[in-house]
């Protein structure tokens, strides 16, 4: 145990020192620790606040090097981030009239502030194509680690299964948000990127049926992502995606899912007959009454305490309270109708900025990696819109990372219009068609033939 803690402290100190010299390393280190979730490893690591220490050092490193990130090459704050800041500010305002404990509402909002700060730092610090590609792959490899440990770490006794997954919960939804990116790398990546994508896909799919956390909402997210993938991708990408989709589908259906998985998923079609789904209808009705009574919100973190006055006693949990199990309604209840309006506007502008970059993908030219990221992340974001209706993911870090990604990709696409292209070999046939071919014997008399058509 002592050796494990010693190694952890050495790595933490090394990462902090490197972050002070290069803040970008701090961004990557925070993401790795977020996925690693040292609490699940035990052995004393649960007592070390890795992410807190790394975040403090990252803030210091950013302030030390702030001139580097605020010059002409710095990323400009765009509309999605402005709405996120507005949402954060409104959260602090609602603490003034919190129904039970104003101090608790304030502390809950401060916790949300931490998510916003990291998203902002990531947005400001990542400034090049190479850094963006590295960031994406660090996230995807970390998703692989999370999925691997959920299956094999649990079976081999390496982790505490009660702490399994990413640090904040909502692991299935988090993985689904990056799954379309893996499909695109399997299609358009170079040789090594394709190998890695095809290697990670089975582990991500394996995570979905072996964890009870949000199992049905995660499956809904998977189906929704596939649907939006075929709606928004250009025809050439859609046709090419048949192979990775078939690969993933066969493995998921015939290899990874246990016998009772599809029986459980079938209850999605009959929510009124399934216990937890039916109770959500009762809870939603109670939430609407709460919103009607407190249209400006009850204060962040207050839903459970207020539920005893609105949710029927038979629907309360063993603790005597009940949570909303609905991201949209929980935001509306805790931060009011103004809060949910701001949040939805933030989400809509985030999608719009992804779309502005993604629309530059055409059928006759290989997309840039930046455009490919925009497409994958756009689909990942849209993919969770249905699933979060049945769970509380308003504080899931990944949602606000995507706000940062949308602004970041918009800035990168603006600064690097001729960025590296992905999958150029897939467009070789079109390149041959566009290349001008010499013409012979059709030059009019008395007119000098251009050099391009002379023999």
Image: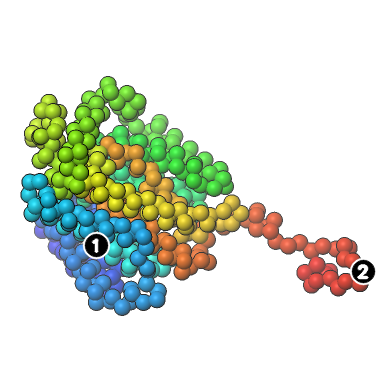
- For the point 16% across and 52% down, which residue is it? 94
Secondary structure of the residue carrying tag 1 is: helix
| Crowd tier of the residue under label 2, counting other residues whose Cα lies within 10 Å: few below 14, some 14–19, many 20 or above | few
Say which quadrant the C terminus sits in. Answer: bottom right
- For the point 15% across and 48% down, which residue is it? 299
| Crowd tier of the residue under label 1, counting other residues whose Cα lies within 10 Å: few below 14, some 14–19, many 20 or above | few
Q: Is residue 216 above or below residue 359?
A: above
Of residue 226 and residue 356, the one placed in the foreground of this image is: 356
Q: State the image coordinates of residue 433 (x, y, percent, origin top left).
A: 69, 56
- For the point 41% across and 68% down, which residue is it? 128
Q: Is residue 214 above or below residue 55?
A: above
Looking at the rendered structure, which numbered label has been put on residue 445?
Answer: 2
Q: Quadrant of residue 319?
A: top left
Q: State the image coordinates of residue 438 (x, y, percent, origin top left).
A: 79, 63
Q: Which residue is mark 1?
A: 117
Of residue 27 and residue 148, the one placed in the foreground of this image is: 27
Number of dots carrying numbers: 2
Q: State the image coordinates of residue 418 (x, y, percent, origin top left).
A: 53, 66
> Residue 269 vs residue 15: left or right?
right
Q: State the image coordinates of residue 334 (x, y, percent, origin top left).
A: 18, 45
């Amino acid at each position: 145990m002592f050796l494990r803690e010693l190694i952890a402290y050495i790595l933490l100190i090394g990462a902090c020192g490197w972050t002070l010299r290069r803040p970008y390393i701090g961004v990557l280190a925070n993401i790795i620790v977020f996925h690693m979730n040292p609490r699940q490893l035990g052995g004393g690591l649960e007592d070390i606040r890795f992410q807190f220490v790394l975040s403090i050092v990252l803030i210091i490193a950013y302030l030390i090097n702030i001139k580097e990130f605020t010059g002409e090459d710095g990323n400009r704050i765009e509309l999605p981030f402005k709405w996120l800041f507005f949402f954060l500010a409104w959260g602090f305002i609602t603490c003034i009239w919190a129904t039970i404990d104003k101090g608790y509402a304030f502390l809950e909002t401060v916790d949300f502030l931490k998510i916003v700060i990291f998203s902002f730092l990531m947005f400001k610090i990542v400034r090049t194509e190479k850094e963006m590609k590295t960031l994406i792959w660090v996230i995807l490899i970390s998703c692989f680690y999370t999925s691997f440990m959920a299956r094999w770490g649990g079976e081999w006794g390496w982790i505490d299964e009660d702490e399994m997954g990413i640090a904040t919960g909502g692991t299935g939804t988090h993985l689904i948000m990056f799954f379309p990116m893996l499909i695109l790398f399997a299609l358009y990546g170079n040789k090594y990127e394709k190998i890695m994508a095809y290697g990670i896909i089975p582990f991500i799919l394996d995570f979905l049926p072996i964890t009870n956390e949000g199992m049905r909402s995660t499956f809904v997210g998977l189906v929704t992502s596939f649907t939006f993938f075929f709606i928004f991708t250009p025809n050439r990408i859609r046709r090419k995606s048949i192979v990775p989709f078939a690969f993933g589908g066969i493995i998921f259906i015939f290899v990874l899912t246990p016998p009772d998985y599809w029986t459980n998923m079938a209850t999605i079609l009959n929510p009124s007959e399934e216990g937890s789904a039916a109770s959500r209808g009762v809870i939603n009705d109670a939430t609407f009454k709460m919103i009607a009574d407190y249209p400006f919100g009850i204060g962040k973190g207050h839903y459970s305490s207020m539920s005893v006055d609105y949710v029927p006693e038979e629907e309360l949990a063993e603790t005597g309270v009940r949570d909303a199990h609905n991201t949209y309604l929980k935001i509306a209840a805790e931060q009011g109708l103004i809060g949910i309006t701001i949040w939805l506007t933030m989400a809509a502008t985030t999608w719009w900025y992804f779309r502005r970059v993604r629309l530059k993908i055409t059928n006759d030219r290989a997309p840039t990696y930046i455009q490919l990221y925009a497409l994958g992340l756009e689909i990942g974001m849209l993919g969770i819109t249905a699933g979060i209706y049945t769970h509380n993911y308003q504080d899931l870090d990944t949602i606000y990372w995507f706000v940062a990604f949308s602004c970041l990709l918009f800035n990168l696409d603006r600064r690097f219009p001729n960025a590296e292209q992905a999958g150029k070999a897939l467009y070789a046939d079109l390149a041959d068609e566009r290349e001008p071919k010499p013409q012979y014997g059709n030059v009019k008399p008395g007119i000098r033939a251009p050099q391009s058509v002379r023999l």
